[in-house]
Image (cartoon, rainbow, N blue to C red):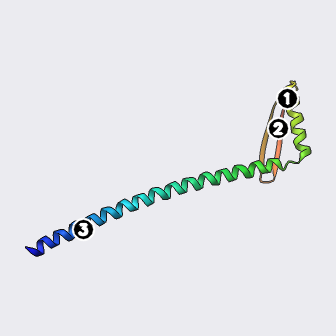
C-alpha cells in the first residue's frame, strides 16, 4: 500500500510539473508571436521610411518642380499628378492634362 500511495504522489507531481511546463511554453509562444508581429511592423515602417527617403532624394530642384506642378493642378491646368515607382532607382511623374 505504501508503494501505491507513493506512485500516486509521483504521478500527481509529474502531472503538476507537466501542466506548469505547458503553461510556460504557451506563455513563451505567445511572447514570441508578439515579438514577430513587432518585428514585422518595424520592418514595414523601415521600408516605408526608405521609400520616403528615396522620394526626398529627388533633389531640391525636382521637388520645386513637383510643387509647381501641384500649383498648376490647383489652377485647373492639370487633372491629376501621380508618382510611379519603376524600380529601386527610377521614379516617374505622370501628369494628366486637361484638354
> Tag 2: Cα neighbours inside 10 Å, few (<14), some, or many (≥20)?
few
Residue that protrudes farthest toward the bottom in the picture:
3
Residue placed most toward the observer, 91 or 13: 13
Above or below, 9 relative to 28: below
Question: Mark 2 and mark 3 in contact (Cβ < 8 Å)?
Answer: no
> Tag 3: Cα neighbours inside 10 Å, few (<14), some, or many (≥20)?
few
Q: Residue at x 48, y 57 (%)?
A: 31
Above or below, 87 relative to 13: above
Question: Residue 56 — which label?
Answer: none
User: Which of label 3 and label 2 is nearer to you?
Assistant: 3
Give coordinates of residue 30: x percent, y percent. Answer: 45, 56
Residue placed most toward the observer, 77 or 56: 56
Give coordinates of residue 94: x percent, y percent. Answer: 82, 38
Question: Mark 1 and mark 3 in contact (Cβ < 8 Å)?
Answer: no
Regarding mark 1 in the picture, which secondary structure is present there?
helix
20 relative to 98 in the view: left or right: left
Quadrant position of the N terminus in the picture: bottom left
Badge 1 is on which residue?
73
Give the mark nearest the N terminus, 1 or 2: 1
Give coordinates of residue 99: x percent, y percent. Answer: 87, 24
Label 3 to label 1: alpha-carbon separation: 76 Å
Q: Residue at x 72, y 50 (%)?
A: 49
User: Which of label 1 and label 2 is nearer to you?
Assistant: 1
Badge 3 is on which residue?
13
Residue placed most toward the observer, 14 or 85: 14
Give coordinates of residue 51: x percent, y percent. Answer: 74, 49
7 relative to 49 in the view: left or right: left
Q: Residue at x 78, y 43 (%)?
A: 84
Specify the quadrant of the image occupied by residue 83: top right
Badge 2 is on which residue?
94
Amino acid at each position: 500500500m505504501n508503494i501505491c500511495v507513493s506512485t500516486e504522489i509521483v504521478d500527481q507531481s509529474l502531472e503538476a510539473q507537466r501542466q506548469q511546463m505547458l503553461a510556460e511554453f504557451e506563455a513563451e509562444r505567445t511572447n514570441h508571436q508578439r515579438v514577430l508581429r513587432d518585428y514585422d511592423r518595424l520592418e514595414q515602417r523601415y521600408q516605408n521610411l526608405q521609400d520616403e527617403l528615396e522620394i526626398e532624394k529627388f533633389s531640391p530642384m525636382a521637388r520645386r518642380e513637383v510643387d509647381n506642378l501641384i500649383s498648376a493642378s490647383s489652377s485647373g491646368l492639370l487633372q491629376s499628378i501621380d508618382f510611379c515607382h519603376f524600380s529601386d532607382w527610377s521614379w516617374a511623374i505622370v501628369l494628366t492634362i486637361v484638354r
